[in-house]
Amino acid sequence: MKKPWETFSAVGELYEPELKRTVKEWVLLMQGLNKCDWYLKSGGCTMCGFNGPASAKEEYAWLTKYFGRSALDAMYWFGYFGIRHQRPERLTIYNGGNFLNSGLEVPGSKPEIPFSLQTAICRHVGRHPTIEKLFVETKASFITEKNIPILKECIGRKTLQVGIGFESVDDRVRDKLLKKGTTRFEFEKKVDILKKNGVRSFAYVFLKPVGLSEREAIDDAVNTIAYCFAKGIDEVSLSCAFIQEGTEMCEAYRIGAYKPPTLWSIIEVVKRTASLGPVRVGTFEDEPPPIDVPKNCPECTGTVNAALDRYRCSFDPAVFDGLDCPCR
Ligand SMILES: [Zn+2]
């Protein structure tokens, strides 16, 4: 039988390019006090399924409704209690929004994670015997000159890494096609704040927004990754489009106007950028579960996916050598 915390807290494995080995990763799916601030303000990004009615957030919404901020503290410590004997080396928190949004960073924002809990988690990681690194995600706007130095002080000599959804260097793709609401200027400024404070930076790059052809999407992702490393980003993750219910992307998919990228496209992006810095390839699993994912023809999809898995635990693009199929 599933333990009560297992739906939101578990330990798995993840390759760390910095260490050149696989580490034990504690993944905590955390509820926020409110949904993603950008979703509330704008309806959110066109490919994001985190906030729709099919998302797991709805399942836990009652928790914060009745218990407020103490529900989140309880979720963290209860989640930790469940995995504490497994000696994780890294903690990754996904809250389907902005971990750094306590309501104070950007005027008019509804808080997602109270600052008291952000600092408590950093302090916990800071003195934990095995966890060396904390990874959180946020929209760039919640990175400030105020919160970052405090969080860094709380985590001490351990590593804090902040993942930013930047997605595309092309203003039209980022603003019009994906509706990210982050400018290049803001992104660069916030990356500088992270660097100045000894916090590691991480950028999500999106492969194949609705509105770009397969070829345009590949070139856009390659240009974006090159730009990110040129601006000092420490690590990039390629988010390959998959279809989740309740998104604008899903509507285009349903009328036959859009298909996720092929696995060949993913491989091309990796091969053209792997020499620039660590490029992670995101998995095609998420919450809510995708209804379609990147694939090739039925003959080669299995083999090529297996090669992608080998890449995910080695970051070595040589694993793609020799792969071919008439569908390429
Ligand atoms: Zn094929």
Image (tube, grey):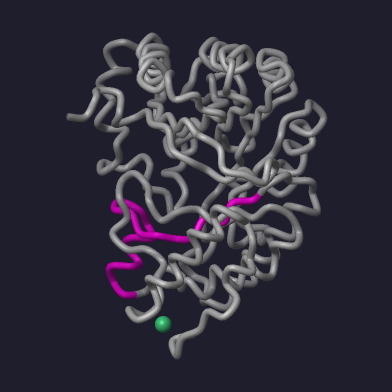
Q: Which of 297 and 51 is in front in this view?
A: 297
The residue lying furthest to the bottom in this view is: 326
Residue drawn at x 73%, y 54% is 277
Residue 175 can be seen in this image = no
Residue drawn at x 54%, y 63% is 207
Q: Is residue 193 left or right of residue 279?
A: right
Q: Which of 123 and 221 is in front in this view?
A: 123
Give percent across and percent down for residue 140.
Answer: 64, 37
Q: Nearer the viewer, residue 49 or 179?
A: 49
Q: In this view, does 273 lie above or below 116?
A: below
Location of residue 269 (image quadrant): bottom right
Numbered disc total: 0
Residue drawn at x 66%, y 28% is 160
Give percent across and percent down for residue 63.
Answer: 28, 18
The residue lying furthest to the left in this view is: 1
The magenta stretch spans residue 247: yes
Location of residue 305 (image quadrant): bottom left
| Quadrant in which the N terminus appears | top left
Residue drawn at x 57%, y 56% is 238
Give percent across and percent down for residue 216.
Answer: 59, 75
The magenta stretch spans residue 125: no
Q: In this view, does 46 lie to the left or right of 234?
A: left
**Ligand 1 image position (quadrant):** bottom left
Q: In this view, does 89 lie to the left or right of 231?
A: left
Q: Is residue 183 above or below residue 133?
A: below
Residue 247 can be seen in this image = yes
Give percent across and percent down for residue 286.
Answer: 37, 47
Q: Give the range drawn in magenta.
A: 236-256
